[in-house]
Structures are given as structure tokens and as C-alpha cells.
Amino acid sequence: MSQAAPAQGVRLVVVHPDKEVLAQAAAARLLTRVLDVQSVRSPVHVVLTGGTVGIATLAAVAASPLVPAVDWSGVHLWWGDERFLPDGDPDRNETQAREALLDVLVAEHGLPEANVHPMPGPSSVATPEEGAAAYAAVLAEHAGSSDGGVGVPAFDVLLLGMGPDGHVASLFPGHEGLSAQGTTTGVHGSPKPPPERVSLTFDAIRAAREVWVVAAGAEKAERVAAALAGDPVAEVPAAGAVGQARTLWLLDTEAAAPTPAPAK
Ligand SMILES: O=C1O[C@H](COP(=O)(O)O)[C@@H](O)[C@H](O)[C@H]1O
């Protein structure tokens, strides 16, 4: 739990004027990244996130004229975390992503349903641990021999939102999930509802070629600054979210604002 922030790849911080522009820009980046990767290899593996900017980004992808430029039959979609709720629950990250983007990609743009890999919930497994184990098995099936032996595909982009407490995926400050072994973990007692969740571990997150953290709003500014300063991962989990080749922080001006020093 006393991990220092790991250093990997290049880190870039990009600041946009507001949350809407941030989501539009993240969507444009995501489509361009998928197109670029598709010009050199297939399949492309993208990890989705829940959260306000994460879902707004997917909605912005759906509205982009570039959607038909992607060969969606060669794209696999994963999740960084999921709230342990029944299929179709409006609070599931999967449900929100399907409504914002995936339904239209499957219906109109050739994304095979088999390429959509939601994390299991209580509709199919009894506990978050069972869900985590089932998801780890699916990830391992798609991990290639050149994927570093971690047991996940080498994700081309792994999107993460960040909560005001600095959590990423469902890895919360001070929680045991921060030091979980393997590629996935069951989560209990999440400070943000619902209490039960399934999450990728840091080992899985750090295997990604690119990690993109998207965050907007003044309530995130203090933890953004702490993560970028390399505060301990146990206190600011976002500090531990780094990609093999590149880590992008995509922020709005409020989330990027320097936080005032505490009053003396
Ligand atoms: O519960 C979650 O919260 C985070 C951040 O959400 P936000 O609304 O503060 O942006 C999200 O990244 C995560 O996937 C989700 O399960």
C-alpha cells in the first residue's frame, strides 16, 4: 500500500477550456488513435471508463463524422471497472456506455457484440470476486504472446475517469484493491456507491500502451495536482495510473487549476 508513483513512458497534460470541449477533444483523440493503430495492426483494444467525462466522451464519439472511418469489426472494447449491479441497471458503466455509443456501433457500424467485453455483475455471478475471476479469464484469452505476460491484451488506449478522492477505475484511496495481485479484483466497501464493484488492478492498467486520465471540475483540482506531483498511490490512486508508452492527462481548466494553499 505504500507504493510510490511509478514512472513509465511519456506524460503529457492537455488542458481544455471546459468539460464539453474536453469531451469533444478526447473523442477526437480517441478516434484518431484507433485509426492510427488500425493502420499498423489489428485488433485494437480500448478500455472504457464510466464517470461524467468518460461517458460524455463516448457520446461525443457517437456524434463524430469520423465514426464510419473506423473498422469497428477490428476493435475490442473493455472496461476499467464496473459497479456490481444487474445487467441493464442505469448505474452500470456498461449501460451508460451502450446508451451513449455502443448500441449505435453494434447496430449501424459493424461492431460485433462479441467484441464488447462488459465486466460481469450479479446477473451472471454471485460475488465481485467471481466477476473479477471471470473477467480475468476473458482478458487472458485475448492476451497475445507479445503482451508482456501480464495476462491482458496490450491495451492501445485505457481511459480512466478520476473521482474527487483521486480514485481511478474502482481503486480507492486506502483500499486493499490498490495492492491486489493479478489483473482484476473484487471491491467491497467502495466509498462511492454502489459499495461492490469489479476493477482492473494496477498491473493490468500499467500494461496499457497508453493510459488517458480524463477529469473535469474544480472538485478534482486538488487530487489532479497531487497525482501529477507524484503523491503516494495509497493516498491518490490516480498517481499510479501510467501507461507503457504514454500517459495523457486530459483536463478542463477547473480541474487543472492550481489549488489555493490552506489558510494558516
Ligand atoms: O464510480 C466511478 O467513478 C469514476 C469517476 O467518476 P466521475 O463522475 O467523478 O468522473 C469513474 O472513472 C469510474 O469508472 C466509475 O465507476
Image (cartoon, rainbow, N blue to C red):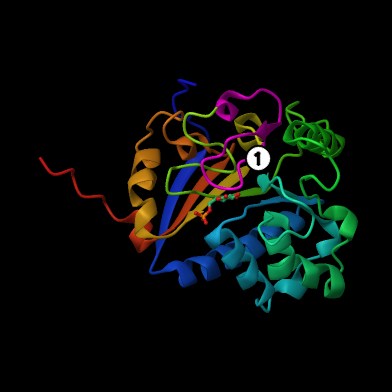
What residue is shown at x 50% (from left), y 34% (from top)?
Answer: 240
Q: Relative to the observer, which residue lies in front, 135 or 203? A: 135
What residue is shown at x 68% (from left), y 63% (from top)?
Answer: 96
**Residue 38 spot, x, y in % from top left:** 76, 57
Q: Relative to the observer, which residue lies in front, 167 or 78? A: 167
* Vertical placement of residue 147 versus 4, above or below: below
**Residue 11 spot, x, y in % from top left:** 46, 43
What residue is shown at x 80% (from left), y 50% (from top)?
Answer: 117
How many numbered tags mark residues here?
Answer: 1
Residue 177 placement, left or right of 37: left
What residue is shown at x 65% (from left), y 49% (from top)?
Answer: 157
Q: Relative to the observer, which residue lies in front, 200 or 88? A: 88
The reply to whether the magenta stretch includes residue 89 is: no
The reply to whether the magenta stretch includes residue 198 is: yes
Report the residue marked by disc 1: 196
* Vertical placement of residue 193 versus 63, above or below: above
**Residue 193 spot, x, y in % from top left:** 57, 48
Residue 86 at least partly seen: yes
Q: Give the range drawn in magenta.
A: 176-199
Residue 191 placement, left or right of 77: left
* Vertical placement of residue 31 versus 203, above or below: below
